[in-house]
């Protein structure tokens, strides 16, 4: 099965799930289930996260569509090379830097008639979140609950329940830095809540659920199923043999030529 997911949702979920600064780095493999809804049916995508001191590779069992006619088979974050590698096929991968991504957000905002978000460092962002007094053990890790309130009037009383453990230290490098020109819908999450609670707190989410007050039901969004320290991650964070790296300018040129 293939899931079509919006770019803003991918960014929001990625930063909520996996963002922190760490000193003693975890090395190994983390498995998690990401839940979606397709025509009323619950779909489960297993995502594997391979972590070393300087690199992280995220790969799901399903390819993710991030633009018309474009799919990703995995995302490699190379903090040692200061870039992101988006695997698009067995032969080609997109190589892009953080500043290039920020530039794309800025360009998309101008094309859409909006303007880049002026809150660059998250200092003025005041997300609505709180810690409950609940704790539970998830896959052997003691986790505490953080509640993130839904700000929309229609969903008043709805909230995200994020269970965090301080016992998994991962070096996220570029992702832990402030991001510029983010879309408004992810600005508060990335530069606000994530920096205050996950970056500085060195926490890692083991379970994310959403309570819908309108339907009076709880929906599971993400759940960690396995955490193992292992050397297998070293092999997984390498670019596969035979894969050619292309830059964002070259990729955009190819896309324009294909439209003609």
Image (spheres, rainbow, N blue to C red):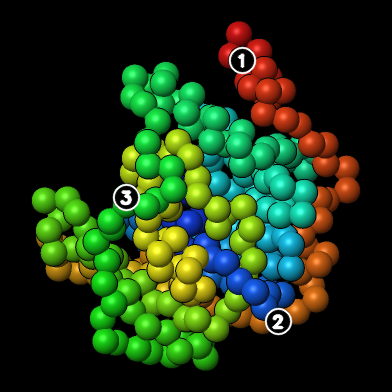
- Relative to 21, does residue 138 appear above or below in the rendering? below
Q: CA distance from mark 3 to mark 1?
A: 39 Å
Q: Residues within 10 Å of mark 1 (few under 14, many from 20)?
A: few
Seen in the image, is 41 located left or right of residue 102?
Answer: left
Instruction: First in sequence, mark 1 or 2: give its number.
Output: 2
Q: Residue furthest front?
A: 123
Secondary structure, mark 3, is loop
Tell me which residue sits at (77%, 49%) in the image: 81
What residue is pinned by disc 1?
Answer: 256
Q: Is residue 230 visible?
A: yes
What residue is pinned by disc 3?
Answer: 124
Query: In x, y percent, where is residue 55?
Result: 72, 60
What residue is pinned by disc 2?
Answer: 229
Residue 89 is labelled as: none
Query: In x, y percent, where is residue 163?
Result: 39, 77
Question: As rendered, which of 50 and 176 lies closer to the eye?
Answer: 176
Q: Residues within 10 Å of mark 2 (few under 14, many from 20)?
A: some
Tell me which residue sits at (52%, 62%) in the image: 19
Query: In x, y percent, where is residue 132?
Result: 26, 81
Q: CA distance from mark 2 to mark 3?
A: 38 Å
Instruction: First in sequence, mark 2 or 3: give its number.
Output: 3
- Relative to 183, does residue 226 appear above or below in the rendering? below
Seen in the image, is 89 located left or right of residue 124?
Answer: right
């Amino acid at each position: 099965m293939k899931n079509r997911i919006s770019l803003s949702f991918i960014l929001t979920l990625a930063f909520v799930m996996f963002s922190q600064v760490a000193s003693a780095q975890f090395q190994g493999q983390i498995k998690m289930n990401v839940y979606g809804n397709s025509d009323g049916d619950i779909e489960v995508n297993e995502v594997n996260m391979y972590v070393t001191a300087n690199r992280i590779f995220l790969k799901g069992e399903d390819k993710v569509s991030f633009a018309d006619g474009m799919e990703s088979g995995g995302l490699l974050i190379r903090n040692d090379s200061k870039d992101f590698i988006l695997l698009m096929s067995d032969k080609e991968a997109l190589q892009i830097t953080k500043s290039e991504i920020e530039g794309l957000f800025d360009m998309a905002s101008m094309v859409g008639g909006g303007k880049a978000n002026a809150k660059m460092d998250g200092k003025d962002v005041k997300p609505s979140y709180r810690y409950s007094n609940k704790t539970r053990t998830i896959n052997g890790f003691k986790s505490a609950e953080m509640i993130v309130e839904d700000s929309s009037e229609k969903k008043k009383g709805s909230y995200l329940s994020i269970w965090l453990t301080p016992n998994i230290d991962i070096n996220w490098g570029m992702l832990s830095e402030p991001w510029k020109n983010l879309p408004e819908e992810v600005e508060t999450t990335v530069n606000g809540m994530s920096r205050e609670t996950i970056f500085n707190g060195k926490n890692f989410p083991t379970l994310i659920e959403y309570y819908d007050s309108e339907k009076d039901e709880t929906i599971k969004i993400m759940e960690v199923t396995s955490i193992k320290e292992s050397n297998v991650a070293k092999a997984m964070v390498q670019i596969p043999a035979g894969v050619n790296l292309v830059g964002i300018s070259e990729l955009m040129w190819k896309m324009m030529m294909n439209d003609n």
